[in-house]
Image (cartoon, grey):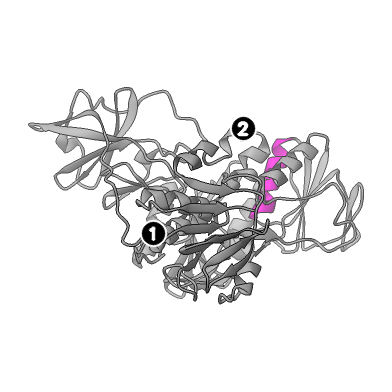
Amino acid sequence: MAEESSELEGPDFEKGVETETVADREMLLGHAFGEPVLVARRGDDLFGIGATCTHYGGPLAKGLMVDCTVRCPWHHARFDLRTGEAIAAPALNDVACYNIEKRGNRFFVTGKIDKKQARTPATSPASIVIVGAGGAGGAAAETLRREGYDGPVTMIGADEFLPYDRPNLSKDYLAGSAPEEWIPLRPPEFYSDQRIDTFTNMSVTAINAKTKEVTLSDGRSLGYGALLLATGAEPVRLKIPGDDLPHVCYLRTLTDSRRIIEKAKNARSAVVIGSSFIGLEVAWSLRERKLEVHVVGKHSLPLEKILGRDFGNLIRQTHEAHGVKFHLGRTPAAIQDRHVLLDDGTKLDCDLVVVGIGVRPNIKLAEEAGLATDNGVLVNEYLETNVPGIFAGGDIARWPDPRAGRIRVEHWVVAQRQGQTAARNMLGAHEPFVVPPFFWSNHFDLHIHYVGHGSGDDRSNVSGDLEAKNASVIFKSGDKLTAVASIGRDHENLEAEVALERGEEFRPS
């Protein structure tokens, strides 16, 4: 997260600004009433909203205006310029909306206004049950209320905590630079105020699609009018000697992250098994805590299949420059009290082992309920399963992406946005889920933005200077754009997102 700067930039909109200062389809950063304000123009209409993204404090003035919305350059949250409403995750809170008065050839910001209108859903199920309290489940519960649904909403989570900021568990929170009060997405009273019934430390053991009931792990039954499955994924477990030793950790939940932090306090060295995004973010975070860190990965370069060879080299070099030691093309053979033994006989000293070798979707509940599955729960473009009234979102959902075909991805922003879309569709919106997947990943001073969905067979082309950390890697299948990974080019990554959405050619700046 980032704290908002106390210095106000740009013109004082209370004193008035020449209207022509803001060109059509452009934005201007200024301030009013002691707060940063963004003014945008579309035709003859002027809109004013708060200029700071409510997710991590990103500068919306450096984002991208698309129709009557603005997209944050940091993590692609979207806001309605007409109302200030947060209309796409990861931002959940709205920004302020300001009244603008035109006087001759000048405009003035005269105060805050509330332009949100009450919504009435097209349909209202008798009740809605959400199985899972992660990114998709939490976003769905909030969206139901935003969309005007007034019926019972119940969210059931196997975790001991209500929805929290999962990406931070391997990033700033694990590194020690984000306090725990940043982790919950909402305080407990938010859910009671919104009349969202919540269960923690609770799972659903069965679904009866005929009677529209779920059975809880405590034996109770709960009826539903519509059901969202957002059961997430579980880490793939190592199966080698010593895999159950007390210093072996996995990272999926807040409890997991807390456990790693506690063990890191008394550790000098760590071995991270897995050179995935999670594994490498853990390596970065543990180096921030001054541990010696070894990364063991079975591939010749970290993330080469996803980001290509050039980017993979840069990631390795960045980590090595900060003291991370790589053991690539290797797998662990055994874990001992003070060592990890590799398949080539190498012994790595360590007090802590963190395993990050992938996750598997939790689809057993869906399978037993008779839902169609294939490496995930199969859904249509509206995120509805083969059983009417049952939807799926997040890590378990395998949906027909209009660009990449049927896919399942494990990205936080995708999960949240699918929860939002599924919620609207449970209320009769009939809204296809078509936005390109997006994620971000941090590695020391290397901040990666990735939009789209590429494959290991895609042709890649570098635009810019990777060594200078100012570049985009463009992935294509034939002549078709599939994905863009950027560093130091946040605005360009937003432009790539729009190109993917519209099926247009992408021309990097």
Main secondary structure along the magenta-highlighted residues: helix
Q: Could you say whether the residue bearing mark 2 is in a helix, strand or loop?
A: loop
Bounds of the magenta segment = 277-289
> Which residue carries the number 2 mark?
179
Amino acid type for the residue under numbered disc 2: Pro
Residue at mark 1: 424
Q: Nearer the viewer, mark 1 or mark 2?
A: 1
Note whether 51 is above or below 375 in the view shown.
Answer: above
Identify whether 352 is placed above or below 120.
above
The image position of residue 75, as x and y in percent, is 47, 47
Q: Is residue 321 visible?
A: no
Between residue 298 and residue 396, name the one nearer to us: 396
Which x, y percent locates residue 434? 40, 65
Local secondary structure at mark 1 = helix
Q: Residue at the spot x=41%, y=62% of the render? A: 426
What residue appears at the point 49 percent right and 30 percent down from the top-left corner?
3
